[in-house]
Image (cartoon, rainbow, N blue to C red):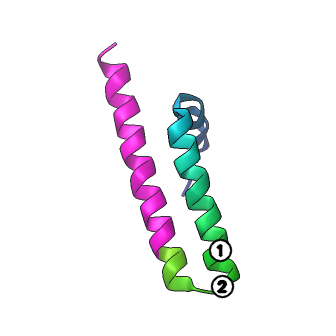
């Protein structure tokens, strides 16, 4: 389900803003879990994965052009 080399590479290629946004997603996911709100957790995780995908694609496109 998770490709660790992609996760690790994405971490090192992320901007400080990207990392801050990702941290907020994880914090929100923790709040949702503590509240036992499965629907909120699903929504937060879906947002996190979609944003991660877009960051990955942006990074991939930047390296293709270099």
Range of residues picked out in magenta: 43-66
What quarter of the picture does the N terminus occupy?
bottom right
**Which residue is at the far top?**
66
Q: Is residue 54 left or right of residue 4?
A: left
Which disc is residue 66 wearing? none
Answer yes or no: do the residues labelled 1 and 2 have beta carbons within 8 Å?
Answer: yes
Residue at image position (58%, 86%) is 37
The total number of labels drawn is 2
Q: Is residue 23 magenta?
A: no
| Quadrant of the rendered image containing residue 8 | top right
The local secondary structure at tag 1 comes to: helix
The answer to whether one can see residue 6 in this image is no
Depicted 45 relative to depicted 60: above or below: below
Depicted 25 relative to depicted 3: above or below: below
Query: What x and y, as percent, mark residue 50?
Result: 39, 56
Pick the residue in front: 59 or 26.
26
- Residue on which disc 2 sits: 35
Q: Main secondary structure of the magenta part?
A: helix
Query: What x and y, as percent, mark residue 62?
Result: 35, 23
What quarter of the picture does the C terminus occupy?
top left
Q: Is residue 41 left or right of residue 58?
A: right
State how far apart marks 1 and 2 are (Cα). Answer: 6 Å
Residue at image position (54%, 76%) is 41
Residue at image position (61%, 77%) is 32
Which disc is residue 31 wearing? 1
Q: Is residue 19 left or right of residue 50?
A: right
């Amino acid at each position: 389900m998770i490709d660790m080399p992609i996760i690790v590479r994405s971490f090192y290629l992320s901007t400080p803003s990207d990392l801050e946004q990702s941290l907020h997603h994880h914090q929100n996911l923790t709040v949702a879990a503590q509240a036992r709100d499965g629907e909120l957790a699903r929504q937060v995780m879906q947002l996190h994965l979609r944003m991660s995908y877009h960051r990955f694609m942006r990074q991939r496109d930047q390296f293709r052009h270099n």
